[in-house]
Amino acid sequence: MSIVLVRHGETEWSATGKHTSTTDVPLLESGRRDAGRLRDRLAGRSFALVLTSPYARARETAVLAGVEDAAQVDPDLAEFDYGEYEGLTTPEIRAARPGWSVWSDGAPGGETAEQVGVRADRVIERALGAGGDVALFAHGHLLRVLAARFIDLPASHAGHLALSTGSVSELGFERERRVIWLWNDTSHLR
């Protein structure tokens, strides 16, 4: 059993480093192209469960990847809620709050990493009960938290796992131990 993590394709805000959660920005043409390349990357895979974030950028990535018929929206896959920091870059936030990190400080009016971890835990349990391979289409920070929680790390440790737009990662098992088999693979984008 494996859990395939797919980060949505590039958006204007992801390209410029803006924190994007509830603002439903569309994929750029480059993001659509990269999402389309996922079709070949996932071809031949059979998924017992396909889940997607409620946001259009993740749902469209699933469509372009060719799994739209199987995809179910799961609100727990929504991106980290950045609250008052929505649409701001890290340098802009740090100008007012030096040393800020989403992983340790969360976002005023939004979520903490631990709160996102609770949602990620629910997704993991749902995936583990699917009876086969699972594909999850979502967002950079949420998927990083999900991977950290899958290997029993605190959600705040997700800051050590960089994740590119359009990337594919894979979680699974080595014997009974949960492991990260593949991380941040973008080879299909070349």
Image (cartoon, rainbow, N blue to C red):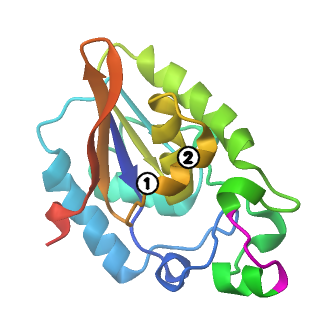
**On-image quarter of the C terminus:** bottom left
Q: Which residues are magenta?
A: 96-101
Residue 97: say if magenta. yes
Question: How far apart are the alpha carbons under marks 1 and 2?
Answer: 8 Å
- Please identify the residue farthest to the front as the structure is shown: 99
Residue type indicated by callout 1: Leu
Q: Is residue 105 above or below residue 50?
A: below
Question: Can you identify the residue that label 1 sits on?
Answer: 161
Residue 8 x %, y %:
42, 60
Residue 120 x %, y %:
58, 35
In this picture, residue 126 sits left or right of residue 164: right
Q: Which mark is residue 157?
A: 2
Residue 86: say if magenta. no
Residue type indicated by callout 2: His
Q: Main secondary structure of the magenta part?
A: loop
Kindly identify the residue that appears in the image at 64 percent across and 72 percent down.
Answer: 19
Helix, strand or loop under label 2: helix
Residue 172 x %, y %:
30, 27
Dot 1 crowding, Cα within 10 Å, few <14, some 14–19, many 20+: some
Q: Is residue 131 above or below residue 102?
A: above
Kindly identify the residue that appears in the image at 66 percent across and 85 percent down.
Answer: 91
- Tell me, yes or no, whether the two marked residues, 1 and 2, touch with CB atoms within 8 Å: yes
Kindly identify the residue that appears in the image at 61 percent across and 41 percent down.
Answer: 155
Residue 67 x %, y %:
31, 44
Nearer the observer, 82 or 63: 82
Residue 131 found in image quarter = top left
Q: Is residue 103 above or below residue 42?
A: below
